[in-house]
Structures are given as C-alpha cells and as structure tokens.
Image (cartoon, rainbow, N blue to C red):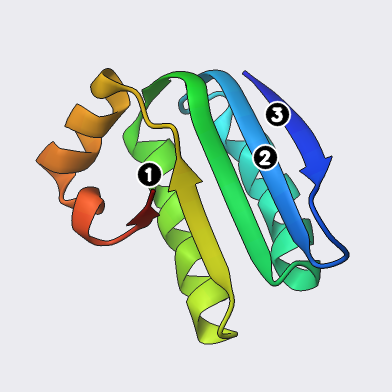
Amino acid sequence: MTIEFRQISETSIELSLVGRLDAITSPMLEKKLKKWVADATDITLDFLNLNYISSMGLRVLLHAQKKMKEQNRKLVIKNMGDGVREIFEITGFINIMTIE
C-alpha cells in the first residue's frame, strides 16, 4: 500500500490510500495518522484506489475516528469502492465512520 499526502489547507489534509490496507500495511497508516491527528482539524481519506481493508485496517480507522472526535475534529472517508463498502456494511463501520 502507498499513502499519497495532499495539504488542502493549513489544518486540512487528504490521504489517498492505494492498494491493500491489511495486517502488513496497517502499522504504516497508524503511524502516519498519529502524527496528523495531532496537527490537522480535518482529515479526508480517499479510498478510490483502495482495493481491500482487513480488520486491522478497520481498527486503525476506528482509533483515528475516536481520537478526532474527542478533539472535535473531522475524519471523512470518500470514494469508497464496492468491495470496501461491502466490508464496511458487514462490519457495521458504515454507520460508525463519516462517509461521503
């Protein structure tokens, strides 16, 4: 998996995830999100090119969502493909995360 970073504004960023978010790649996203959750008020995750997400990836997203919410900040997921959307629906994450 690769993560493409884009600064939207001084406090807003967008991360485009490409490939698979699984047990091997989740620690990389977790490390980056920890840094950016502390600095950004708005984080958008673009899932256009994300092919798969595992339970480890879901855990990372849930933890980031919780931290952002505690600080009255916003984490949004956009451009979710059908395969990833199905995983979100089965696990109930479709109702937990903010999805555009």
x and y percentages locating residue 45 in the rendered image? 56, 43
**Relative side of 91 to 44, left or right:** left
x and y percentages locating residue 37 in the rendered image? 69, 65
Kind of residue indicated by mark 3:
Ile
Q: Residue at x 41, y 58 (%)?
A: 62
Mark 3 against mark 2, which lies toward the viewer?
A: 2
Label 2 and label 1: CA atoms lie apart by 16 Å
Kind of residue indicated by mark 2:
Leu
Label 3 and label 1: CA atoms lie apart by 16 Å
Q: Which residue has dot 1 on it?
A: 58
Q: Residue 23 carries which label?
A: none
Q: Which residue has dot 3 on it?
A: 3
What is the quadrant of the N terminus in the image? top right
Q: Helix, strand, or loop for circle 2?
A: strand
Task: Tell me if residue 98 comes above or below residue 94 in the rendering.
Answer: below
Q: Which residue is drawn at 68% across and 53% down?
A: 33
- Whether residue 60 is visible to the viewer of this picture, yes or no, is no
Q: Which residue has dot 2 on it?
A: 15
Q: Residue at x 23, y 40 (%)?
A: 88
Within-10-Å neighbours for mark 3: few <14, some 14–19, many 20+: some
Q: Do the residues labelled 3 and 2 touch (CB within 8 Å)?
A: yes
Chain-order first, disc 3 or disc 2: 3
Question: Can you tell which quarter of the image residue 84 is in?
Answer: top left
Label 3 and label 2: CA atoms lie apart by 6 Å
x and y percentages locating residue 90 in the rendered image? 11, 38
Is residue 53 or residue 18 the one in the foreground?
Answer: 18
